[in-house]
Amino acid sequence: MNHDPEKLLKTFRKKPLADNAVSLTRCNHASDAVKKIIPHREPFLLVDSITGIDLQNQVICGTRLCRADDPVFQGHFPGYPVYPGSLQLESAGQMGLCLCYFLANQTTEIPVSTQMMQVRATKVLGAQFLEPVPPGSTMELVSQRLEADSFFETYLGQVLVDRKICSVFVGEICIL
């Protein structure tokens, strides 16, 4: 299946991706659990929690609090602090990496003995930044797997604040 990134960006800059999660299993995996499945660590772990997983439709939801005291706001931008688009993309991308784990293991659980997946982002196929994310916002992170083969997977991701779509992207990862 071939997904046109421009068409996806155009569609999902207006339509919440979580609407595709019709059989969402609610969960509450905090950052300690997230650290078991992806290699990121503070200060670059940009997923605070995983709140829902839909294995059938290959969708995952989670959150990230953009703390008002995050040093990134000091320089981006003085007098008009905004969470950087590149970090929004990274946050939703990390959520996609989490989804990769759940789909590979066909579970919504993270057992104590979990082995971390070795995955890396390889390509951003397209991104749009639509609304600013101010300090103190809780971003809703949503990712959906579009296609996969034995090496590469393509994901669609969104960042929302108060149900407003702030950014949308299409990217590719490699399973090592």
Image (cartoon, rainbow, N blue to C red):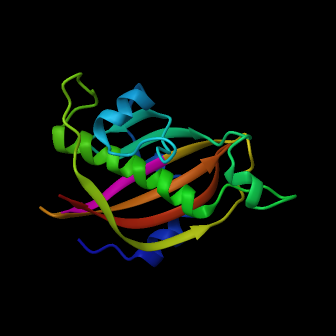
Query: Per the image, is 134 magenta?
Result: no
Task: Name the residue located 66 percent from the left edge and 65 percent from the top edge.
Answer: 130
Residue 127: image location, x then y, percent: 52, 70
Classify residue 80 by image quadrant: bottom right
Instruction: Left or right? Give the position of 103 relative to 166.
Output: left
Task: Name the residue located 60 percent from the left edge and 49 percent from the top edge.
Answer: 160
Q: Residue furthest left?
A: 150
Task: Name the residue located 87 percent from the left edge and 58 percent from the top edge.
Answer: 79
Q: Is residue 55 above or below residue 97?
A: above
| Count of numbered labels shown in the rendering | 0
Q: Is residue 15 visible?
A: no
What secondary structure characterizes most of the magenta part?
strand
Residues shaded magenta: 142-148
Q: Is residue 154 above or below residue 158?
A: below
Query: Observer-nearest residue: 82 or 40?
Result: 40
Query: Per the image, is 144 magenta?
Result: yes
Residue 96: image location, x then y, percent: 37, 51
Q: Residue furthest top?
A: 112
Task: Name the residue located 40 percent from the left edge and 28 percent from the top edge.
Answer: 32
Quadrant that contains the C terminus = bottom left
Residue 54: image location, x then y, percent: 33, 39
Classify residue 173 by image quadrant: bottom left
Q: Is residue 141 visible?
A: yes
Residue 56: image location, x then y, percent: 26, 43
Quadrant that contains the N terminus = bottom left
Query: Observer-nearest residue: 1 or 118?
Result: 118
